[in-house]
Image (cartoon, rainbow, N blue to C red):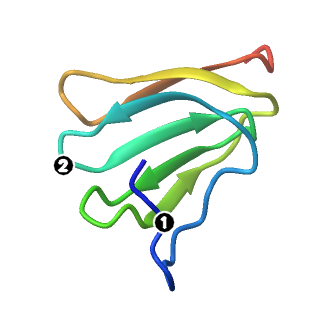
Amino acid sequence: MASIRPGSRRISHQSGVRSCALAPDGRILSASRDYSIAIWSAGDMVRVGSLDGHEGSVEGMAVLPEGDRLLSVSNDGR
């Protein structure tokens, strides 16, 4: 990810990142061992949202070619 700037609003994951993907709109997605997928604005690397719901480490993800859906895999058995 981009370097940290003083006063940055960036919020990082609480554990290691396992996978990254680029959304069609240019945002960056990162899947983590903290059970979440973060959504980042690509220009300034500010976290603009997150997808929660897994109960285990998110090990991978992929944006479908149409760009309207995201698949994620986790070790939570779901």
Q: Quadrant of the C terminus?
A: top right
The quarter holding residue 73 reads: top right
Amino acid type at mark 1: Ile
Q: How many marks?
A: 2
Amino acid type at mark 2: Asp
The spot of residue 6 in percent (x, y) is 50, 81
* Residue ID at (56%, 34%): 31
Compared to 18, does 39 lie above or below?
below
Residue 1 lies left or right of residue 36; in this view the side is left
Q: Element at badge 2?
A: loop
* Residue ID at (50%, 39%): 30
Label number found at residue 20: none
Q: Nearer the viewer, mark 2 or mark 1?
A: 1
Marks 2 and 1, how far apart in space?
Answer: 23 Å
Compared to 59, does 54 lie above or below?
below
Q: Few, some or many C-alpha atoms within 10 Å of disc 2 (few <14, some 14-19, many ≥20)? A: few
Residue 49 lies left or right of residue 13; in this view the side is left
Compared to 15, does 11 lie above or below?
below
The spot of residue 75 in percent (x, y) is 77, 16
Residue 8 lies left or right of residue 78; in this view the side is left
* Residue ID at (70%, 41%): 53
Q: Residue lying furthest bottom in this view?
A: 7
The quarter holding residue 16 reads: top right
Where is mark 1, residue-wise? 4
Where is mark 2, residue-wise? 25
The quarter holding residue 55 reads: top right
